[in-house]
Image: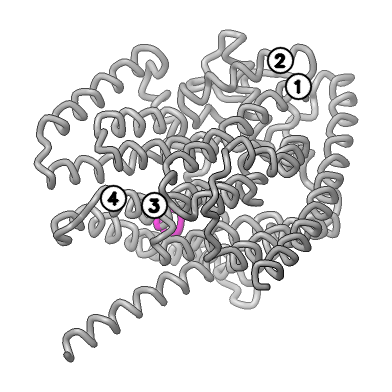
C-alpha cells in the first residue's frame, strides 16, 4: 500500500514538473526571440551597441514570474527527494534505461535558451583565439564579434587553456550562425552532465541507493538549469571533482594530482584541493607518491607556461581581476547592503572604513576551516580517502561562504557531485543542498531586490552554526559523563 501511495505521489510530482519545465522553456524561448531580433538590429549597425545586457527581462514582473517557475521546480524536486529518501531499488537498471527515463528533462534543459551571458563570453573568447588573439592577455573588448553586444564582462579570460579548447570548438560554428555556436557549447555541457551522472552510477555500483542517487543527480533542477540551460563551465569542474573522488577512493594519487591540475586549467577553484591531498600523502607516509605528485605539478606548470600562459599577466588573468573590488551574493555583499541603508546615512568614507575592517573578519573563518581540514588527518586516527573527499567538499562550500565576495549561484552546483558520492554524510548533504538551492533560486528570483543577499547566505550560515552548536553540546555531555 505504501509503495502504491509513493508511486501515485511520484506521478503527480512528475506531472507538475513536466508542466513547469515546459512553461519555463517557453519563457526562455521568448528571450531567445528577442535576442535574435536585437542581433539582427545590431548587425545592421555593425555591433556599435556594446555592453547591452539582452538577457535581462524587460520588467521585474517577467523576472519574478520566471523565478517562481524555477522555484516551483526545486520545491517539486525536494519533495521527491524526501518521498524517496529511504527507497532502495534492488533490481538492477542499466544507465541507458535511467537516461531514457530522464530524457525529457535533459532535452528541455538543452533546448531552453540561457538567461546569463557567460556562454556568449565563452564563445567570444573562442573566436578571439581563432582569429589569432590571445584572450589571456587581450581583453574581450579588444575584439569585435557577432557576440560582442551580448557580453557584459570585457576583461581577459579567467578560464584556463583546457576551457579554451571547448570555447574554440564552439566558436568554429559561429560562422554559420551565432546561435549554433552557443548550442554547440550547450551540447558539450549536456554531454558532460550525462558523463558525470554515469561516473556516479558506476562508482555507486554496490550501493542500494545507486539508482535513486543517479536519477537525482541527472534531473536536478539546479544542475540542469545552471550547467546545461545556462551552460556554465562549472559542469567541467563537476567532472573534475567526481573524477578526483574516484581516484582518491581507488588510491590513485598521481591520477588525483593530475586531475586537480586539469581542473585548475579549466577554472582556478580546484587548486585549493591540492594541499589537502599533499598533507594526506604526508600523513600516510606515501613519500614516493608525494614526490611524484610534486614533480608532475612542476612539469605541468612549466608546460602550461610555455604552451599557453606565456606571461605573468596571463597567469594573473585566471584570478578574475575584474571582480577584485566587486561584491554580490555573499556576506560581503550583505555587509555592503547594510552600510548603504538610507536611514543609516553613513558617509562614503565611513562605509569604506567599516568594510575594510570587517572584510578580513569575514574571511577569517575560511582560514580557520582550511587549517582545521589540513590538520584533520593528524587529529583523527582512522582518516580515510572518504573523509578527505568530504572535507574537500566542506572546504569548497566554506570558500564560497566566507572567501568569495563575488559569488554566483552556479558556483555551488559543483557541491552536488560530492553529495552524490557521499550520501552517508548527512550534515554535508543537507548543508550543500540548502546552500545550492537557496543561492540558485535567490539569484534568479530576487537579484536586484533588497532580500537577495540575505536569502543567499543566511540560511546556510544558520545551519552551519546549528551543527557547530550541536558539536559543542555533544562534547560537553562527554566531559560531564
Measure how far apart labels 2 and 1 are at the Cα level. 6 Å
239 to the left or right of 107:
left
Q: Earlier in the sequence, mark 2 or mark 3?
A: 2
Q: Nearer the viewer, mark 1 or mark 4?
A: 4
Task: Count the labels in the image.
Answer: 4
Crowdedness near tag 2: few (<14), some (14–19) or many (≥20) residues, C-alpha within 10 Å: some
Give the vertical position of 198 relative to 416 (above or below).
above
Residue 169: x %, y % from top left:
61, 16
Q: Which residue is mark 4?
A: 388
Give the Cα separation between the discs numbered 4 and 2: 42 Å
Residue 374 relative to residue 8: left or right: left
Q: Nearer the viewer, mark 4 or mark 2?
A: 4
Q: Which residue is mark 2?
A: 173
User: Reading the chain from its start, which is encountered first: label 1 or label 4?
Assistant: 1
Report the magenta residues as a range: 398-402
10 Å crowding of disc 1: few (<14), some (14-19), many (20+): some
Distance of label 1 from label 4 (alpha carbons): 41 Å
Q: Find residue 381 and report its horizontal and vertical position in percent.
A: 14, 60
Amino acid at each position: 500500500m505504501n509503495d502504491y501511495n509513493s508511486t501515485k505521489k511520484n506521478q503527480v510530482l512528475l506531472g507538475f514538473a513536466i508542466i513547469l519545465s515546459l512553461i519555463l522553456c517557453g519563457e526562455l524561448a521568448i528571450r531567445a526571440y528577442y535576442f535574435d531580433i536585437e542581433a539582427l538590429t545590431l548587425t545592421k549597425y555593425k555591433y556599435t551597441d556594446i555592453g547591452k545586457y539582452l538577457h535581462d527581462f524587460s520588467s521585474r514582473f517577467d523576472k519574478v514570474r520566471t523565478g517562481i517557475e524555477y522555484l516551483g521546480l526545486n520545491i517539486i524536486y525536494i519533495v521527491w527527494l524526501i518521498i524517496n529518501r529511504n527507497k532502495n531499488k534492488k533490481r538492477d537498471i542499466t544507465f541507458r534505461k535511467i537516461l531514457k527515463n530522464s530524457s525529457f528533462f535533459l532535452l528541455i534543459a538543452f533546448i531552453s535558451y540561457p538567461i546569463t551571458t557567460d556562454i556568449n563570453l565563452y564563445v567570444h573568447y573562442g573566436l578571439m583565439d581563432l582569429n589569432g588573439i590571445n584572450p589571456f592577455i587581450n581583453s574581450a573588448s579588444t575584439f569585435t564579434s557577432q557576440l560582442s553586444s551580448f557580453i557584459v564582462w570585457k576583461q581577459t579570460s579567467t578560464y584556463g587553456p583546457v576551457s579554451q579548447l571547448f570555447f574554440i570548438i564552439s566558436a568554429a560554428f559561429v560562422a554559420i550562425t551565432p546561435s549554433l555556436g552557443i548550442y554547440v557549447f550547450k551540447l558539450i555541457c549536456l554531454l558532460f552532465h550525462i558523463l558525470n551522472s554515469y561516473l556516479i552510477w558506476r562508482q555507486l555500483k554496490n550501493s542500494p541507493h545507486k539508482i535513486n542517487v543517479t536519477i537525482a543527480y541527472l534531473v536536478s533542477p539546479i544542475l540542469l538549469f545552471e550547467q546545461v540551460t545556462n551552460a556554465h563551465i562549472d559542469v567541467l569542474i563537476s567532472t573534475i571533482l567526481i573524477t578526483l573522488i574516484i581516484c582518491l577512493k581507488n588510491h590513485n594519487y598521481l591520477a588525483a594530482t593530475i586531475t586537480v591540475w586539469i581542473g585548475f586549467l579549466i577554472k582556478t577553484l580546484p587548486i585549493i584541493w591540492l594541499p589537502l591531498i599533499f598533507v594526506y600523502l604526508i600523513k600516510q607516509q606515501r613519500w614516493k607518491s608525494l614526490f611524484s605528485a610534486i614533480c608532475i605539478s612542476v612539469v605541468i606548470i612549466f608546460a602550461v607556461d610555455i604552451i599557453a600562459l606565456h606571461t605573468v599577466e596571463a597567469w594573473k588573468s585566471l584570478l578574475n581581476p575584474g571582480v577584485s573590488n566587486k561584491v554580490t551574493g555573499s556576506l560581503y555583499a550583505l555587509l555592503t547592503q547594510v552600510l548603504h541603508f538610507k536611514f543609516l546615512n553613513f558617509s562614503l568614507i565611513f562605509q569604506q572604513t567599516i568594510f575594510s575592517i570587517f572584510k578580513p573578519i569575514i574571511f577569517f573563518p575560511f582560514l580557520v576551516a582550511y587549517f582545521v581540514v589540513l590538520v584533520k588527518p593528524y587529529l583523527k586516527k582512522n582518516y580515510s580517502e572518504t573523509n578527505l573527499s568530504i572535507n574537500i567538499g566542506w572546504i569548497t562550500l566554506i570558500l564560497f561562504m566566507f572567501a568569495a565576495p563575488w559569488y554566483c549561484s552556479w558556483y555551488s552546483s559543483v557541491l552536488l557531485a560530492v553529495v552524490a558520492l557521499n550520501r552517508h554524510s548527512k550534515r554535508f548533504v543537507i548543508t550543500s543542498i540548502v546552500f545550492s538551492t537557496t543561492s540558485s533560486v535567490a539569484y534568479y528570483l530576487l537579484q536586484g531586490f533588497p532580500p537577495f543577499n540575505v536569502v543567499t547566505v543566511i540560511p546556510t550560515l544558520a545551519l552551519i552554526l546549528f551543527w557547530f552548536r550541536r558539536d559543542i553540546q555533544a562534547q560537553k555531555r562527554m566531559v560531564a559523563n
